[in-house]
Image (cartoon, rainbow, N blue to C red):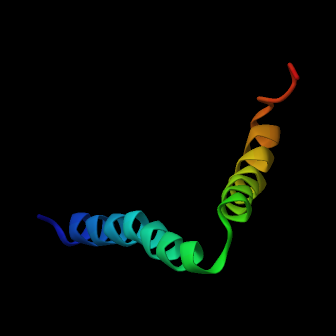
Amino acid sequence: MSRRALLLFAAMCVIWGIPYLFIRIAVTELPPVELVFARTAGGALILIPIALARGELRGL
């Protein structure tokens, strides 16, 4: 395996695993409704600007 592939694999593992750590912490700190809202709002804050830049929201 090349060095680049190994670094990309390590980055993927970290990116994939971090949400489980945050969920474990958040479940003890937030009620379920607030946790779901925070996850949905966070996703929307990331995805809506991307969709606007690509012109995907014109039909709405």
Q: Is residue 4 left or right of residue 48?
A: left
Residue found at x 82% / y 40%: 52
- Of the 4 image quadrants, the one containing the N terminus is bottom left
Q: Is residue 19 left or right of residue 40?
A: left
Residue found at x 65% / y 61%: 32
Q: Nearer the viewer, residue 51 or 37?
A: 37
Q: Nearer the viewer, residue 20 or 30?
A: 30
Q: Position of residue 54 (x, y in %)?
A: 75, 36
Q: Quadrant of residue 10?
A: bottom left
Q: Nearer the viewer, residue 55 or 39?
A: 39
Q: Is residue 54 left or right of residue 1?
A: right
- Of the 4 image quadrants, the one containing the C terminus is top right
Residue found at x 71% / y 47%: 47
Residue found at x 39% / y 63%: 16
Tell me how many marks there are.
0
Q: Quadrant of residue 12?
A: bottom left
Q: Position of residue 28 (x, y in %)?
A: 56, 79
User: Does residue 7 sit above or below 33 in this rendering?
Assistant: below
Q: Is residue 58 left or right of residue 54?
A: right
Q: Quadrant of residue 55?
A: top right
Q: Position of residue 45 (x, y in %)?
A: 77, 56
Looking at the image, which residue sits at the far left? 1
Q: Nearer the viewer, residue 38 or 13?
A: 38
